[in-house]
Image: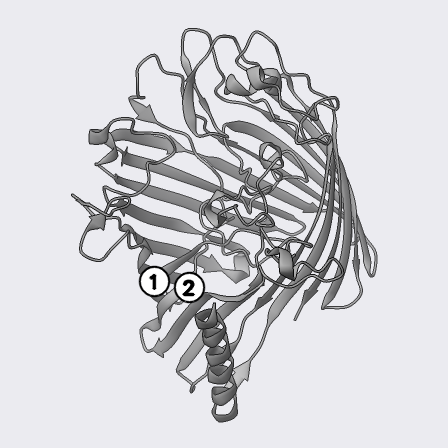
Amino acid sequence: MRQKYFLIFASVLFFSYFSEALELDWSGQFRTEAHYVLNYALDSSNITVNAAQEAGKGYYISGGGSNKATFQTLFLKLRPKIIVNDNIYLKSEWWVSDPIYGFFGSGVPYTVDQRQYYSTQSRGSLISAQRLWAEFLSDIGTFQVGRAPLHWGLGVVWSQGDGLWDRYESTGDVIRLVSKFGSFSFNPALIKYSQGNNIGGAAGVLPYAPVAGDGTVMDYSLMLKYENPDEDFEGGVHFVKRIAGSVQDRFLGIGTTAAQAAVGMNFNIWDLYAQKKFSRIKLAGEVPITSGQIAGIEYSSYAIALEAGWKITDSWDLALRAGQAPGQQNITTAAPDKYKIFYFNPNYRLGLIMFNYQLANFQGPNTQNNPATAADTLLSPFDNPITNANYLNMDLAFHLSRWSFHSNWTFAQAKDVAAPGYSFYNTWKKQYFPAIGTQSRALGWEMDYGAIFQWDEAFQFQFDFGFFFPGSFYKFSNTATENTTSTVIAGVANVGLTF
């Protein structure tokens, strides 16, 4: 603990010292939210655990003792930038709390002798450096070295998470060149995500007996982009070759044998993107296409995200989004012969409930208030990316000088569902289970309404409420008894600052 506070103190001194000698520029975001979700278990009468339906490994949500969930979050993001000279910049991003687990009220002291019922300490709100990189300007472009943000297109694969309400950030340790020649940009990069357990290979679990292979995950990336502001057009292709060592964690439940788990993964992503504006209409699309292998199994898939925006008048906007994210096919063998499921980046949200909250995780553990809860066992209430779905989303907004009002409608169907005689892939648990019944494709539909008050360029207040009508897809418990489903209601009040 002393080492953590020493590092924080040293960091403050470091930036204070350089702020006197060099130019220091600050920006950042602050937000606090209050969430209320009624009937999160999809069944208003379900406030306990049905052991039989839970054991079925279907889409049953266990009740946690209440049919509603209420929680608040708190998060501060700081972005200090040091301007060394005209050609060198040091950029960083620091978190106070956490964009997912920064809950109000989760800081009560652990030990009995320190328990103060009239006080909350920031046990879980230490400052952490999430990004830290240097930029060097040269005649051929800008070189970036360090832990830097990653983004491409609409954010289906890589989303840098710059939005005020974004919770997930694409970040990697990079050596990257950002080079632009007229309307064309050329950005090659080497990106590393994980070293594994040690630097001389990869040690196994305790007591760390050496095993063959390594734990590195690497991306070899190349972005080619064309931008023409005069024509309001931009587009390009992002190529990513991902290679993972043989002793990373098993991937999405694929690779059931020791031989398969020892293969790692090696696949390519061709991510196509384009955006064009015609007067008051804007069209955009992103199509990532994958090919290669994961755990010795063929990985071949593609996803589609399409967007259209129409500024009807100066006050009215209409936005449409449609697309598809593949699921995983049923199998009759121990392992699939092809892997095709695709998960969108969780920042790519369509509404308030269906593709935002992971309702199955609400029972927890979500905080470390209990000292026996380890950090790696925490479940995110927001980890519900778009997958195994065809979707259509419509958003209608009305703007005044400081107020904006919007309504949002989402409809979705599953692409792959369980069928008797096969093993189905549960996208929540990321595992295969034998199916004993037939599952519907209807994921359901949702309607949301909200208002935003923009006091000035910095301050924003937002309130949203929504109704999710779950489809019969969620009635599948993989037992003789179907899950009971009813409407989920949610409300969120947000206060945000951008500076």
Q: Earlier in the sequence, mark 1 or mark 2?
A: 2
User: Residue 344 at what x, y percent from top left?
Assistant: 49, 40
**Residue 148 tag number:** 2
Q: Picture coordinates of residue 173 (x, y %)?
A: 35, 61
Mark identifier at residue 245: none
Q: Is residue 279 above or below residue 176?
A: above
**Quadrant (top left, top right, bottom left, bottom right) of the C terminus:** bottom right
Residue at (33, 64) in percent of width and height: 176
Identify the residue at horizontal 34%, vertical 62% (top origin).
Answer: 174
Instruction: Please report the residue visible at 59 percent of the width from the left and 38 percent of the height from the top.
Output: 364
Q: Are marks 1 and 2 in contact (CB under 8 Å)?
A: yes
Q: Residues within 10 Å of mark 1 (few under 14, many from 20)?
A: many
What whole-number distance in Å separates the C-alpha atoms at marks 1 and 2? 7 Å
Number of numbered labels in the structure image: 2
**Nearer-the-camera pick, 400 or 262:** 262
- Outermost residue on the left side: it is 212
